[in-house]
Image: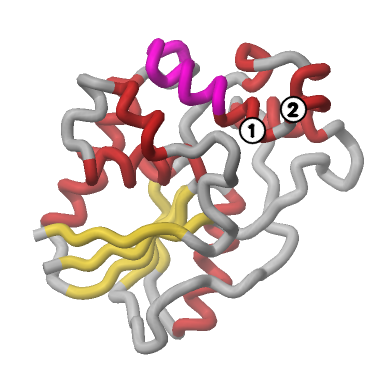
Amino acid sequence: MKKVFVRKIFPYDSTFDGEFSRYDGYDLITLRKLDPGISSHPDMELPESMKPVCVFCSDLRRGKETAGEIAKNLDVGEVVPLDLLREVKFDIKKLLTREEFEKEGSNLVRQRFVSAFIDDALEESRDEIKARMDKFINQVRKLPGGNYLVIGHSFFMKILETYRREPNLFENPSKLVKHLDVAKRTYDYGRGFDFEVD
């Protein structure tokens, strides 16, 4: 049995030290045109005695930097960056205007993201997202038993968590609505969810 602990990346500065507005910075980040590093190191919520076999992480800079910090703290030798764990690709400017973002903020981003996921209107299709998740789970299935830590991104994590609970999510994408509360942050930094794989 493999126990998988999925945790959100550490905070990063979407303005790149004030070079961009938050809206423009997020646009560049969500389209993978810029790749910020982490800006702080909060605690990661993990069981006290948890010693992962290895740390899997998004191959984006903030994923690798978060994993590196955690690996040092947990004295884990192997960090494995994977493009399979990248954030879902989307275009924030197709979801909402600058004015809407400044007025409504992240709540409206989450709401519009969910709608775009349901309509299959993100920059990355539902089939592509599902294929990444299936490929990652299949990789985990082949591993020896033990604890594995995964460092990921908000929307990818929430879709993965929902998919683990609702195996037909991609056939019935509106199921994401009951698992993603648009009025709340998907996960705090360093927090997430756990699941098991045979």
Asked whether the residues under the numbered discs 2 and 1 touch, taking CB atoms below 8 Å apart as contact, a structural biologist would say yes
Front residue of 92 and 172: 172
- State the colouring used for the structure image: secondary structure
Q: Nearer the viewer, residue 181 or 7?
A: 181
Q: Residue at x 38, y 80 (%)?
A: 47
Instruction: Categorize mark 2 by other alpha carbons within 10 Å: few (<14), some (14-19), many (20+).
Output: few
**Which residue is depicted at the point 38% across and 17% down?**
118
Judging by the rendered image, the residue that carries numbered circle 1 is: 107
**Which corner quadrant of the image does residue 164 belong to?**
top left
Q: Magenta span: helix, strand or loop, mainly?
A: helix
Residue 34 lies, in percent from the top left, at 68, 35
- The image quadrant that residue 196 belongs to is bottom left
Q: Which residue is mark 2?
A: 104
Q: CA distance from mark 2 to mark 1?
A: 6 Å
For the residue marked with disc 1, what is the amino acid?
Answer: Asn
Q: Position of residue 78 (x, y in %)?
A: 38, 71
Residue 143 in percent (x, y) is at 15, 63
Q: Look at label 2 and name its amino acid.
A: Glu
Quadrant (top left/top right/bottom left/bottom right) for the N terminus: bottom left
Q: Which residues are magenta?
A: 111-121
Query: In this rendering, is residue 169 above or below 94?
Result: below
- Depth order, front residue of 101/130: 101
Q: Quadrant of the C terminus?
A: bottom left
Q: Residue furthest bottom?
A: 49
Looking at the picture, how far across and down is residue 175, in whole percent? 31, 28
**Element under label 1?**
helix
The image shows residue 118, relative to residue 104, as above or below, that is: above
Position of residue 5 relative to residue 112, above or below, is: below
Query: Tag 2's secondary structure?
Result: helix
Q: With 91 as the anchor, is 158 left or right in this view?
A: left
Residue plotted at (74% across, 59% down): 39
